[in-house]
Image (cartoon, rainbow, N blue to C red):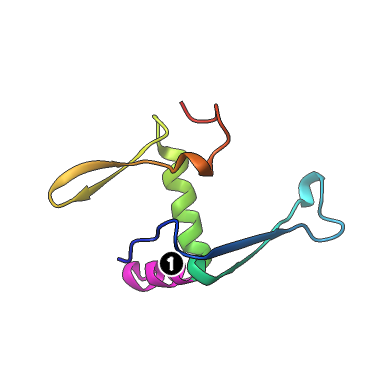
Amino acid sequence: MKDINKNTIMAVIKRIPEGFETGNNRKIILEIDNGDLEAIEEVMGQYRFVNEQALLRYALFSLIQSSDNKLYVKSDNAIVSVNIEPTLITPGNIE
């Protein structure tokens, strides 16, 4: 898998459709392109998710299930922690 790093141009644009700002009908539309789209396409191929929604659901489920706000993966027969880049989170949200 490619190393997605700070030098990769990535873009996710969040839009809220008119009329879907609040309440039970809240909705966001994410426009994904450049490096983010390339990463999604690579993961889709490697793991054979049926569609992008399945991939995002799996990723969200994995994050929600973490009891210590960390993910662990097996790499070269060792279990390693996957740390979230500090610039990606609001300070104080993850302990």
Residue 19, image x, y percentages: 87, 57
Residue 22, image x, y percentages: 82, 46
Quadrant for residue 20, please give it: bottom right
Q: Is residue 40 above or below residue 22?
A: below
Residue drawn at (41%, 46%) of the image: 62
Near-viewer residue (6 or 42): 6
Residue 75, image x, y percentages: 19, 51
Tell me the quarter of the image containing the N terminus. Answer: bottom left
- What is the three-letter code of the residue carrying label 1? Ala
Q: Which residues are magenta?
A: 38-51
Residue drawn at (46%, 47%) of the image: 61
Residue drawn at (60%, 61%) of the image: 12
Q: Is residue 77 above or below residue 15?
A: above
Near-viewer residue (37 or 35): 35
Q: On the picture, is 52 further left or further right than 2?
A: right
Residue drawn at (86%, 60%) of the image: 18
